[in-house]
Amino acid sequence: TAANQRPGGGRPRPALAAMAARCRLAARFHHIHGANIRLDASHTQATRVESFANGLCFSQEPLAPGQIFLVEIEEKELGWCGHLRVGLTAHDPQSLEVVPEYSLPDLVNMGDTWVFAITRNHNRVVVEGEEVQVQARPWEPFLLIERVRIPRDTLVGRSRPGRYSHILDDLYKMNVLPATARRSRIGVLYVPQPNGTADMHIVINGEDMGPSARGLPATRPLYAVVDVFASTKSVRVIPVDYGFPSLQTLCRLVIQKHIVHRVAIDGLDLPPLLKNFCQHE
């Protein structure tokens, strides 16, 4: 899988590096998108510039098994009814003659597409006799979804630096804010099953919402779908580091552990780029 296995699993370093490079490449939006979407130069931020629809986006590459496509809600727009929608599709975006106006129902009605509106009480498909997994505590360092292991730190939204940012950050970690709040982070991935199919999972601020869809064709390329719909105006792709955390991430964790809130970082004798990373990432 794209996610790192248990320590001691014995993955060769070149394979881990190649996997990380693939994940970085996929952590961008595809150049094919809805008519009202504008991408930034890096293809990591998608903004709907008018209306409330025609906001469909796709991952640049198909996802690897267990690889999460993670976005953060950057901007909201009042006056619309509805929120962000995410999912997976087996359609190559380049094969679409016209990008549908809506993910629901238009893209879903084309078949081989599984998309859900983001809500707190998320659609969960439970098989009869299956035990519902107990959610891990929010301070545990990794999110475990069956055999997939993802560093939790990147999955959780963060407030903008301010006097009360340390309080808001805890609310994101506990996942008690509205699922589509500004700065929330929402991801989608698929997990292969023994029968050759896959389950789709949606993750909100580090919490697995459970299988949203089952029976996906695991042998086909599956692209992430992000519909920047209605009150959600702009989203940004968040790269996820698998395996060992980067030195930059380790520095941020140590620095944040020794301060009350991120405003205090301004007064530290640190390089500007590291300050920015500690405050905003």
Image (cartoon, grey):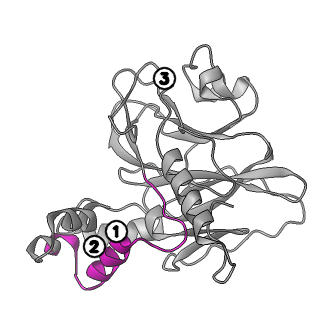
Which residue lies under the disc numbered 2?
166
The x, y position of residue 20, in whole percent, is 53, 59
Circles 2 and 1, Cβ within 8 Å, touching? The answer is yes
Query: Disc 3 to disc 1, how far (Cα)?
Result: 33 Å
Q: Image point 48% across, 52% down: which residue?
A: 24
Q: Earlier in the sequence, mark 3 or mark 1?
A: 3
Q: Which mark is residue 34?
A: 3
Residue 247 magenta-highlighted: yes
Residue 229 magenta-highlighted: no
Name the residue nearer the viewer: 230 or 48: 48
Q: Name which residue type carries label 2.
A: His
Mark 2 neighbour class, 10 Å CA radius: few under 14, some 14 to 19, many 20 or more: some
Q: Name which residue type carries label 3.
A: Gly
Q: Image point 59% across, 29% down: which residue?
A: 103
Q: Name which residue type carries label 1.
A: Asp
The x, y position of residue 138, in whole percent, is 51, 75
Name which quarter of the figure residue 279 lies in: bottom left
Name the residue nearer the viewer: 48 or 135: 48
The x, y position of residue 160, in whole percent, is 25, 59
Q: Which residues are magenta?
A: 238-264
Name which quarter of the figure residue 257 lies in: bottom left
The x, y position of residue 199, in whole percent, is 76, 52
Instruction: Give the vertical position of 204 relative to 13 (above or below).
Output: above
